[in-house]
Structures are given as C-alpha cells and as structure tokens.
Image (tube, grey):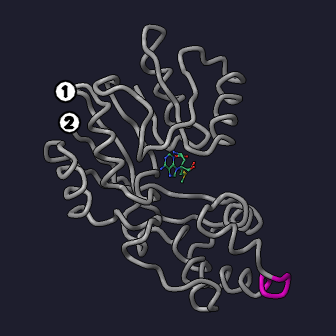
Amino acid sequence: MLELAAGLGDTGLMAARLVGEAGRVIITDFAPEMVAAARRRAEEMGVENAEFRRLDAERMDLETDSVDGVLCRWGYMLMIDPAKAFAETRRVLRPGGRLAFSVWAARERNPTLSLAGTVLVELDHIPPPDPEAPGAFVMADPGRIRELVVGAGFAEPEIEEVPFRWWFADQEAYWRFLTETAASFSPVLRALSPEALNTVRERVHEEVRPFHSGEGYDFPAVCLNVMAH
Ligand SMILES: C[S@@+](CC[C@H](N)C(=O)[O-])C[C@H]1O[C@@H](n2cnc3c(N)ncnc32)[C@H](O)[C@@H]1O
C-alpha cells in the first residue's frame, strides 16, 4: 500500500494498522520535513510495518505495477499537474489495485477553509482564486474528478460525499489553525504587518460568527471520497 502526499501520515498509519503485520505501507510526501515528522510519529506509536520516503506524486521513483493500493487524503488538488499524478498512480498500481482518495467539496460547503480566503481577497492581500490553479477546491466538481481519473486509465470512479463537523475549542485554536497549519493561508498571514494581521483576524472572526458554538466554532465540512480501480 502506498500513501501519497501523506503529510504527517494520519491515513497511512491507520492503513498500517489495518493491513496487519503481513502487510506493508509506504508513507510518502515530497516535503522531506513531512516525511521526517511522519516517521517520528510512527516510532512514537510503535508502528513497524511502514516505511517512509520522499516521493513526488507527479514523478514517482517506483516500479511499474509495484503496489496493491494507493491512498491520498487532501493531496491531489494541491498538485501542480494532477493529470500527471493520476497517470503515475495508475502506472505504479498493479492491475486490479485500488486507488482511494479524498478531496474537498465546494468552497460554500467548507467555510472552515474558504472564509479566511474570502477575507484575504476582499482586503486585497491575495488575488481571487484561479479555478485552474492548484488549491483546496479545484477538484470539488465530480465531473472534473471523473475526467482526471478516467483520463489516467482507471474505470469510472465511485464518488461519495462525506459530511463531517470541524470543531475548534476557541477563537485562538481556529486562528492557530489558519496561521500555522492551513497551507494556503499561513505564508500570506505571516507576511502581513501586525496591524494588517489584526484587521484580517477581526474580519475572519466576524465572517465565522454564524458558526459560533460555546467558546469556539462548530463548522460543517464536506469531502468527496473517491474509489477507483
Ligand atoms: C493538505 S496536506 C495533506 C496531508 C495529509 N494527507 C493529511 O490528510 O493530513 C497536503 C500535502 O501534500 C503534499 N504535496 C503537495 N504536492 C505534492 C506532490 N506533488 N507530491 C507529493 N506530495 C505533495 C504537501 O507536502 C503536503 O504535505
């Protein structure tokens, strides 16, 4: 089993547990820091049937027909050339192997991630999103998913909507998520002056007021989970 764009390896480490001792998971990301962090987590958790590698999903240093399954959570939509990444995925998968991946549904259905972007556009800190450029919502259209997956040589995929709730204990926790972990915002936010950052923070908290719950926030969120052979 191969995990692409694994980040800290949440999904691959779960898969390692599921495949048991006889199975093996290769957890990969193109950022060496992510690979190192995922490896540390596996050591802490005592996972022994996973290996860790730096791997670019658009040009995989792996043999053709060499893995039984490929997993990728929240990765393909951020790749510069997703068609190439799906073609590479098809190449390394054994005939009959399965691909399972998750991407975000439309921005209106994912306020946790989209509202901060809306504020940054309104305040002229970033340009309006380019629908063709890599980004959280570029694979939100099931038609686009089908086109990419079938275009890479897979059969018609199964696409399932998966709604969930995204909780933040307080305003600070949500702000930390945006400034420290949200890949599309944190570099922009970190580059702002303290005054500009404060204005953004106030506007973001106004925008997300409808999702207030207790001290923090309770956002709806929707992913599209896809399975293909
Ligand atoms: C939003 S994070 C998702 C991380 C993880 N899969 C998760 O669900 O928590 C996206 C990850 O994709 C990685 N990434 C982006 N483009 C990539 C590529 N072409 N090849 C491999 N990894 C890539 C980034 O380094 C980052 O760790």
Kind of residue at disc 2:
His
Residue 199 sits in which quadrant?
Answer: bottom right
Where residue 47 appears, as percent x and y from the top left, is 61, 18
Helix, strand or loop at disc 2?
loop
Q: Residues within 10 Å of mark 2 (few under 14, many from 20)?
A: many
Q: Which residue is mark 2?
A: 229
Label 1 vs 2, first from the N-terminus: 1
Q: Indicate the position of residue 189 as horizontal and vertical percent values.
A: 72, 74
Residue extent of the magenta highlight: 193-198
User: Circles 1 and 2: CB distance less than 8 Å?
Assistant: yes
Q: In the image, what residue occupies the spot 50% across and 44% down? A: 5
Q: Of the numbered discs in the image, which one, if any, rests on residue 44?
A: none
Is the CB of the residue bearing disc 1 within 8 angstroms of ligand 1? Answer: no
Q: Residue furthest left?
A: 155
Q: In this figure, which residue is indicated by the disc labeled 1? A: 96
Q: Is residue 219 above or below residue 73?
A: below
Give, as a three-letter code, the residue at label 1.
Gly
